[in-house]
Image (cartoon, rainbow, N blue to C red):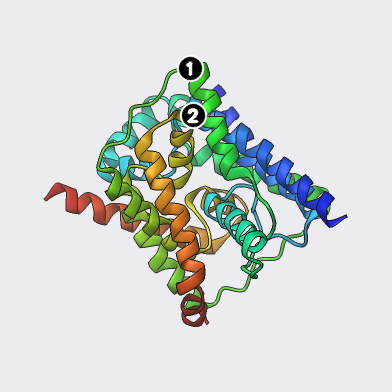
């Protein structure tokens, strides 16, 4: 049960409470916005573009959770074992990353926020989880052939 | 004052990100792999659940994240926070659903969700870094060329 509780605390509980603290600092944020890789990465990229190019892309502010996750992954890997390396060509992964971010921006969330939003009782997130499952199923069918 | 607020946002999100990244790396967290496992062999997942619910909960991701989020939601409700459910516009849900299917397909093909790729990049996996390069280029591309179209379709 330990792993379950740690995941519940760090992935579900902590980011959702951090949202409340952020709501005091920033303007009204969307629901369950504490952990969303695509939204926070978008906010960071748009914030930097705004800063450098003096244009106005939509952003909630300088969210640093995406670089934080990379740093956390580095610290975890230093302390213990590394997981098995990814398979596939680097160019394919670049293209898949490109498509993943565009499709996630169409949804307005990533799978991590889908899980958080389901905890908040969001019907929209449940529909998107079914959509993601359908996409995974299509990929599995293609792989089986 | 605005700069102080931005610094607070940056620091708080960085701290949360580091904690999440660390735990995800230690417990190999991915939000797409469990869906793959479930859809590939639902019977196996069912037997795992029946054999030991504790072990199943330890190995899975969604129950923990949903339970933690629900607990936070209940705490916030007790503290007086009252979130409003957003109005579900059909166009937005349809566009989002198309995005969800494509997202599921490409994430399964890449071998993990964006969260997985971020902590994997922290491990030093070069392929994960090339995924992230495409990921961040995609965000810029979306905002320059696609955002208006998606907003129009979602109406």
Name the chain under label 2.
Answer: B
Instruction: Name the quadrant of the N terminus of chain B.
Output: bottom right
* Residue drawn at point x = 48 percent, y = 50 percent: A111
* Cα distance between the residues tagged 1 and 2: 9 Å
Q: Nearer the viewer, residue A119 or B14?
A: B14
x and y percentages locating residue B67 in the rendered image: 59, 41
Above or below: residue B52 compared with residue A100: above
Above or below: residue A128 compared with residue A37: below
Secondary structure at badge 1 equals loop
- Asked if residue A1 can be seen in this view, the reply is no
x and y percentages locating residue A29 in the rendered image: 71, 60
Q: Is residue A42 left or right of residue A60?
A: left
Q: Quadrant of residue A67?
A: top right
Q: Which residue is mark 1?
A: A80
x and y percentages locating residue B74 in the rendered image: 72, 47
* Residue drawn at point x = 65 percent, y = 66 percent: B85
Q: Nearer the viewer, residue B140 or A84?
A: B140
Whether pointer 1 and pointer 2 mark residues with C-beta atoms closer than 8 Å, the reply is yes
Mark 1 Cα within 10 Å, few/some/many (few <14, many 20+)?
few
* Residue drawn at point x = 50 percent, y = 82 percent: B152
Count of labels in the image: 2
Mark 2 Cα within 10 Å, few/some/many (few <14, many 20+)?
many
* Residue drawn at point x = 56 percent, y = 33 percent: A71
Secondary structure at badge 2 equals helix
Q: Which residue is mark 2?
A: B25
- Asked if residue A25 can be seen in this view, the reply is yes
x and y percentages locating residue B123 in the rendered image: 45, 29
Q: Quadrant of residue A59?
A: bottom right
Name the chain under label 1.
Answer: A
Above or below: residue A26 compared with residue A9: below
């Amino acid at each position: 049960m330990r792993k379950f509780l740690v995941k519940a605390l760090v992935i579900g509980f902590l980011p959702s409470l951090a949202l409340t603290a952020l709501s005091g600092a920033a303007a009204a944020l969307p629901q369950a916005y504490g952990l969303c890789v695509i939204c926070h990465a978008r906010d960071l990229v748009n914030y930097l573009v705004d800063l450098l190019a003096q244009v106005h892309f939509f952003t909630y502010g300088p969210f640093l959770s995406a670089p934080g996750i990379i740093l956390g992954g580095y610290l975890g890997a230093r302390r213990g074992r590394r997981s098995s390396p990814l398979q596939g060509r680097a160019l394919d992964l670049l293209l898949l990353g490109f498509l993943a971010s565009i499709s996630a921006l169409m949804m307005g969330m990533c799978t991590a926020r889908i899980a958080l939003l389901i905890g908040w009782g969001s019907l929209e997130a449940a529909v998107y989880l079914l959509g993601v499952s359908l996409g995974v199923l299509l990929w599995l069918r293609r792989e089986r052939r | 004052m605005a700069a102080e607020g931005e610094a607070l946002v940056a620091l708080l999100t960085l701290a949360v990100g580091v904690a999440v990244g660390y735990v995800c790396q230690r417990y190999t967290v991915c939000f797409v792999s469990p869906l793959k496992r479930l859809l590939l062999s639902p019977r196996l997942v069912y037997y795992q659940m029946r054999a030991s619910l504790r072990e199943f909960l330890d190995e899975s991701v969604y129950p923990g994240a949903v339970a933690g989020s629900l607990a936070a939601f209940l705490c916030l409700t007790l503290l007086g926070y009252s979130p409003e459910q957003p109005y579900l516009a059909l166009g937005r849900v349809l566009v989002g659903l198309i995005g969800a299917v494509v997202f599921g397909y490409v994430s399964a093909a890449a071998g993990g969700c964006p969260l997985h790729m971020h902590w994997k990049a922290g491990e030093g996996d070069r392929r994960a870094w090339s995924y992230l390069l495409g990921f961040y280029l995609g965000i810029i591309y979306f905002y320059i060329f696609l955002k208006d179209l998606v907003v129009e379709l979602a109406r």
